[in-house]
Image: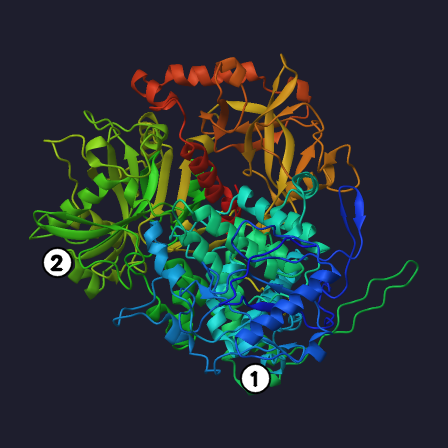
């Protein structure tokens, strides 16, 4: 008999009833297990035959899994009849006898926190709670009552800004437990979208010609209230993750987004965020806080597995989504749960990030458990992956933007043009052994297809350009909805408070290469400081658009200003630098020069609007690019990046600051709400240096100071190569990383090997364009190009030059699968040094720099993932390795030695190399490791030893000034701040990855 449950007679609990039979799913991957077919589940070595598990959604301490016997069915029917009689309802007992066992909850009026269906009234960020009441049973069927269907609101009504502000600003999660109370207490009264009797919706095969895809022909009759079922999105996940073809991925995503734009535009923003593996824009913090403990409890609660059985699944699969899928794969519940909707899933997941306080663990566990109960088949796998933030589908940001642009272009394409596109010929079939190759018929040109493709390519350029200036999917969708692609740049422009993706520089190996590529074009060389890049947003009237909770107001005697600081990865770090925020107030309240200097004669003629900015009487807003560097409070000399990392990240007070910083500005992207991205660097720099003069407070040397980056212009030199070399050596002596060479005016020059056209054809028509080979003459821009590795900015770092820095001979011992453009290759690669005393190979760093495409292909042949487990093994290390807990996707046999160079050696809380030689719990690692060549003359036993590595570090410390020695070794609590490792790895990836989708590899590491 099942455990007895207490029932309140006055308020009978709701009931659930399973519908007879089960509709067999016929999806693209056949991944939905039919709930009507019981399967045998092995537990503790025994087979459980015909075992049915009922999931109890109550929040009390009763067991969550019980075996239902025949006597329980009679009891359940009896209780159901009594409850209906108390409510004045009658049940047709003749038909009720044939119904399956009823599952019920103990409490009728239970309000489940953060667990509401997606509501049209609340939109994406609406109420996250709902009171769950199950329908009565009539005539053997579950009767569902829903409110009258209302017309779907247009997308603009859901995401339109309030108070006539320019665009939507997604609100940030609340900061306290009290902030979530309205979400928990306010039930959604809008239409009940899902129901118990609803059947799951089959996924759609989106792998079809995007130019011939007809959204109007897709059957959406089974979609609850025309809202997107989660199973459709999961079908997209499955199709995208099952291929490495970028063309196929773009085609599937294009058709999917085209369908949403046509039939359910309200589900477009949630789908974009779920596909992007984020719930909010990157610059808004959003941590779900779903750890392994919450997941394990939810999986055991839903599946009935014991901890030892769950551990076996973890040991076998390792991925949280795979573990949850396998745990629930063979489970059948008495009552088919209501199908999930994309909006519903998005709202609940977003609600998890808003739950804080002492009871947050229990609340999050309840939400995760209920979502897992409702999820079916592959939904479980990808739902859990979304919770842990590792979707693993290979659809990176640029690919997603490309698909969105193409879908929008196809939506607004003239019907007569689309109808005239001819189908592509079928691909050639694979030849069997002995079969002769047949010549492919000549493909006749299709002018209509070519014109559609051209329009899609132009749309891609526009959408990508807008997004890197305004990285917010919600605002982007609103802009597209208000007029499509025409005028999108004006509707979704540069806003104070929303970060721009920073402009990047191309890598050069020597100053001679700089002179060769730029020729006689005017340029300036700026010191590349060893600090943290910052994007400063300031506005007297507050942020443009709606406030999303970021930034801070700074108030003084002369006024107040709203300030927000972003890192190079668009992370909000305003709270880390309150002294910098106070400095910005001083900059804006100082009087401006009454007679500003005119633009240099070498510069091009500025426009009238730029001239007016130079004569502005007051600065009301600006966006500035700068570098924050730790400086000596007495002399102002530069200090190391490790010193800067010793500053706390949260709850920083000005009076507690011990590491003084300087803000060294080098670019200006917006002034008085007027974007300057299209102006040449000579104009932007003149405005910056004229209107923002250097400042320091001699009365209080501990406060932040403001200055311009030291530079040297080619137009003022007699012997350019010699004087530039001297300037390079001087900045290196001052602890700078090298030089940033920037064009002052646009012109024509030679491109480098890292130049690549990322707007190449990605549609259904094969492209004949190839990647840039370098050395071609083309226009070089002096404008500010967000998120571009511009050929107008050239980077000359000391660790890139031959003859500078010591090299190490390290052994590759493992690797991870690459992301984005490097999907299908090994990247990054785990390198180790040799410890002769213990015989172990100790992990030093991950390396993703210095490799060519051909090297990646050859490496995959030398270490194939299948076929040679003795050389490349997924589960077992192929040597005595000490990795400090790091576990790559595959382990390599130690059979090669690579020469590696880097900027310097740092203490690491992650890598264990040479820790025993230092007598410390921390090991050593390399900043910015870069592959140089394979050492064919060495075996792994002859690699750099741990003692040699430790000696190199001691020599580096000895050569450094005594003042910096203590600060670079230790911080206040005896631990190295993890930001050293993270920022180093991230900057290395941004500097050395190919720009096309390299940002996804950055997040991976």
Residue 852, x across and y down, in percent: 60, 42
Residue at the spot 37% in from the left edge and 22% down from the top edge: 970
Side (left or right) of 92 relative to 515: right
* Image depth: mark 2 or mark 1 in front: 1
Side of 725 where 802 appears, left or right: right
- Name the residue: 65% across, 71% down: 204
| Outermost residue to the top | 837
Q: Nearer the viewer, residue 436 or 394?
A: 394
Q: Is residue 392 left or right of residue 289?
A: right
- Pointer 2: residues within 10 angstroms few (<14), some, or many (20+)? some
Q: Reading the chain from its start, which is encountered first: label 2 or label 1?
A: 1
Quadrant position of the N terminus in the picture: bottom right
Q: Residue at x 64, y 70 (%)?
A: 200
Between 852 and 726, the residue placed more toward the observer is 852
SS for callout 1: helix
Q: Residue furthest bottom?
A: 416
- Which residue is more in the foreground, 241 or 762? 241
Which residue is at the front of the view, 818 or 609?
A: 818
Q: In this picture, is 807 found above or below 150?
A: above
Real-space CA distance between mark 2 and mark 1, rounded to the nearest whole angstrom = 51 Å
Location of residue 302 in the rendering, given as x and y in whole percent from the top left corner: 63, 53
Residue 448 quadrant: bottom right
Task: Look at the picture and state if 173 lies above or below 154.
Answer: above
Whether label 2 touches label 1, CB < 8 Å: no
Query: Is residue 912 in sight in this rendering?
Result: yes
Up-down relation of residue 380 to residue 531 (above or below): below
Residue beneath label 1, please? Answer: 417
Residue tagged 2: 615
């Amino acid at each position: 008999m099942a455990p007895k449950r207490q029932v309140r007679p006055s308020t009978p609990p709701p009931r659930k009833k399973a519908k007879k039979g089960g509709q067999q799913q016929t999806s693209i991957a056949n991944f939905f297990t039919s709930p009507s077919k019981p399967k045998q589940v092995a537990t503790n070595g025994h087979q459980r035959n015909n075992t049915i598990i009922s999931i109890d959604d109550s929040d009390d301490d009763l067991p969550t899994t019980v075996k239902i016997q025949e006597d329980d069915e009679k009891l359940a029917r009896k209780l159901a009849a009594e409850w209906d009689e108390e409510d004045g309802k009658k049940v047709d007992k003749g038909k009720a006898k044939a119904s399956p066992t009823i599952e019920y909850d103990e409490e009728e009026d239970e309000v489940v926190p953060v667990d509401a269906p997606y509501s049209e009234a609340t939109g994406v960020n609406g109420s996250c709670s709902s009171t769950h009441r199950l329908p009565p049973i009539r005539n053997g069927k579950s009767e569902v009552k829903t409110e009258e269907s209302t017309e779907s609101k247009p997308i603009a009504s859901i995401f339109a800004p309030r108070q006539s502000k320019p665009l939507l600003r997604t609100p940030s999660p609340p900061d306290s437990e009290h902030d979530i109370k309205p979400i928990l207490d306010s039930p959604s009264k809008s239409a009940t979208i899902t129901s118990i009797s609803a059947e799951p919706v089959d996924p759609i095969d989106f792998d079809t010609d995007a130019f011939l895809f007809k959204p109007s022909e897709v059957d959406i009759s089974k979609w609850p209230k025309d809202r997107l079922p989660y199973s459709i999105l999961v079908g997209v996940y499955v199709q995208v993750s099952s291929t490495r073809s970028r063309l196929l991925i773009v085609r599937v995503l294009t058709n999917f987004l085209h369908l949403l734009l046509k039939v359910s535009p309200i589900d477009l923003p949630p789908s974009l965020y779920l596909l992007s593996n984020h719930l909010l824009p990157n610059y808004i913090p959003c941590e779900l806080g779903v750890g392994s403990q919450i997941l394990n409890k939810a999986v055991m609660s839903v599946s009935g597995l014991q901890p030892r059985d769950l551990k076996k699944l973890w040991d076998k699969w390792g991925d949280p989504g795979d573990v949850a899928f396998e745990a629930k794969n063979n489970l059948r519940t008495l009552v088919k749960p209501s199908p999930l909707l994309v909006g519903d899933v998005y709202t609940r997941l977003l609600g998890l990030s808003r739950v804080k306080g002492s009871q947050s663990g229990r609340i999050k566990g309840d939400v995760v458990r209920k979502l897992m109960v409702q999820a079916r088949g592959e939904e479980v796998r990808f739902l859990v992956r979304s919770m842990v933030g590792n979707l693993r589908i290979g659809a990176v940001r640029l690919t997603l933007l490309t698909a969105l642009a193409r879908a929008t272009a196809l939506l607004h394409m003239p019907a007569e043009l689309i109808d005239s596109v001819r189908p592509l010929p079928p691909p050639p079939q694979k030849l069997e052994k002995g079969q002769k190759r047949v010549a492919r018929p000549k493909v006749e040109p299709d002018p209509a297809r070519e014109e559609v493709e051209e329009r899609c390519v132009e749309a891609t350029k526009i959408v990508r350009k807008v997004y890197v200036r305004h990285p917010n999917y919600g605002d982007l969708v609103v802009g597209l909805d208000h007029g499509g692609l025409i005028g999108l740049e004006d509707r979704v422009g540069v806003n104070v408070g929303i970060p721009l993706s920073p402009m990047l520089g191309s890598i050069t190996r020597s100053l001679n290469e700089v002179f060769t590529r730029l020729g006689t074009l005017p340029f300036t060389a700026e010191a590349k400081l060893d600090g943290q890049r910052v994007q400063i947003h300031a506005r007297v009237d507050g942020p443009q658009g709606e406030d999303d909770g970021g930034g801070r107001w700074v108030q003084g005697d002369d006024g107040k200003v709203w300030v927000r600081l972003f890192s190079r990865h668009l992370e909000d770090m305003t709270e880390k630098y309150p002294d910098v925020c106070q400095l910005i107030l001083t900059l804006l309240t100082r009087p401006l020069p009454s007679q500003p200097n005119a633009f240099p004669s070498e510069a091009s003629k500025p426009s009238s609007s730029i001239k007016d900015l130079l004569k502005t009487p007051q600065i009301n807003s600006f966006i500035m690019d700068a570098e924050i560097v730790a400086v000596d409070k007495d002399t102002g000399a530069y200090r190391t990046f490790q010193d800067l990392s010793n500053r706390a990240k949260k709850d920083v007070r000005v009076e507690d600051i011990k590491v003084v910083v300087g803000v060294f500005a080098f670019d200006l992207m917006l002034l008085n709400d007027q974007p300057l991205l299209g102006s040449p660097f000579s104009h932007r720099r003149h405005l910056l240096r004229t209107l923002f003069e250097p400042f320091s407070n001699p009365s209080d040397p501990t406060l932040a100071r403001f200055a311009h980056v030291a530079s040297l212009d080619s137009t003022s030199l007699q012997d350019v190569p010699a004087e530039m070399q001297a300037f390079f050596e001087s900045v290196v002596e001052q602890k700078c990383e090298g030089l940033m060479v920037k064009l002052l005016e646009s012109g024509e020059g030679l491109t480098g090997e890292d130049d690549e056209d990322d707007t190449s054809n990605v549609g259904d028509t094969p492209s004949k364009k190839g990647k840039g080979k370098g050395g071609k003459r083309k226009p070089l821009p002096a404008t500010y190009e967000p998120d571009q590795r511009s050929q107008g900015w050239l980077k000359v770092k000391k660790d890139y030059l031959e003859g500078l820095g010591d090299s190490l001979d390290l052994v590759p011992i493992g690797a991870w699968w690459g992301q984005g453009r490097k999907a299908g290759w090994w990247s990054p690669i785990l390198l180790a040094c040799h410890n002769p005393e213990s015989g172990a190979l100790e992990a030093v760093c991950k390396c993703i720099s210095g490799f060519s495409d051909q090297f990646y292909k050859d490496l995959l042949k030398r270490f194939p993932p299948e076929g040679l487990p003795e050389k490349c093994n997924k589960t077992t290390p192929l040597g005595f390795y000490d990795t400090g807990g790091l576990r790559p996707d595959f382990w390599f046999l130690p059979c090669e030695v690579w020469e590696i160079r880097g900027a310097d050696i740092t203490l690491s809380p992650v890598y264990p190399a040479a820790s025993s030689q230092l007598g410390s719990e921390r090991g050593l690692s390399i900043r910015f490791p870069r592959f140089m060549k394979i050492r064919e003359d060495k075996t792994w036993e002859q690699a750099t030893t741990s003692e040699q590595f430790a000696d190199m570090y001691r020599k580096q410390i000895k050569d450094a000034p005594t003042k910096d020695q203590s600060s670079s070794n230790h911080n206040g609590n005896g631990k190295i701040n993890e930001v050293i490792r993270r920022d180093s790895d991230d900057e290395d990836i941004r500097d050395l990855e190919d720009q096309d989708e390299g940002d996804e590899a950055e997040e991976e590491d």
